[in-house]
Image (cartoon, rainbow, N blue to C red):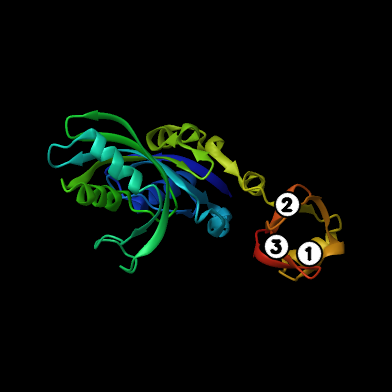
Amino acid sequence: MPSGLLLVDKPSNITSGELVRRIEKIFGEKAGHTGILDPKVSGLMLILVGKARKLAKFFFGMDKEYEGIMHVHKEFDEKELRKVIKEFEGEIIQLPPKRSKVARVPRKRKIYYFRILKIEGKDVYFRVKCEAGTYIRKLCHDIGERLKKGAHMKWLRRLKVGDFSIENAVKLEKLEDSKDPGKYLVPIEKIPEILNFSIAMIEKEKIFRKARNGAPLKKEEISIKNKRNDKPIAIYYKKKIVGIANEKKGTLFWDCVLAD
């Protein structure tokens, strides 16, 4: 059954849930996203297909980059706008909007940069890089409030999630029209390498059978090929992924078992 990571360019005017359902129809397999986009927002979404869904937790918390348009409600001075925007770079306190599904309590978020690309009348074209969980719609609103002119987000497109870029994403329409959609799927065996996990191998079949049943392994029962400190360990047998584990005092405990 197909299993892996899909970089999809979500069109506007569909929900993230609808996108997932259409991908499930394409592959005939369950799928799940690693973070939603509002229906009117387009751009990069990471979709996990098949048993790769078990790896979703490792994609949470990645920084995001967007391009958008902020419409300022009244005439403004560009110099003053740039000054206000600078005040929103770095660590900010943001109160989630009323329509959000999370608790409406102030929380810290980091804005790495908010760059003005161009200004056309009252429309401010921008690019922003921010910490996961930042509401760009609320950010635009808050900038407008600080400017004392009012503002709202007019358009938004997500360009990056962590190191994943929209340039490597496939459009939904192209995916649906493809006779070989599997060619756009990053195989599950390659995902740990992309995430910079440590890599280890099981050499003996009896150890593989033990691992497949979810039993903890001793460190000496595997062969570590690529060790990265403070990273989970992806364990393989005959080039197929067995699962993801974490080491504690010489014992490997499974985060998830992926072997059939």
Which element is circle 2 on? loop
Q: Is residue 69 among what the camera can see? A: no
Q: Residue at x 79, y 71 (%)?
A: 249
Q: Nearer the viewer, residue 146 or 150?
A: 146
Q: Is residue 166 above or below residue 251?
A: above
Q: Which residue is mark 1?
A: 209
Residue 124 percent location from the top left of the image: 25, 35
Looking at numbered disc 2 in the image, what kind of residue is underneath it?
Arg
Residue 14 percent location from the top left of the image: 29, 46
Left or right, residue 238 beside residue 158:
right
Quadrant of residue 82 in the image? top left
Q: Which residue is mark 3?
A: 245
Quadrant of residue 128 in the image? top left
Q: Is residue 196 above or below residue 104?
A: above
Q: CA distance from mark 1 to mark 2?
A: 26 Å
Which element is circle 3 on? strand
Q: Which residue is mark 2?
A: 228
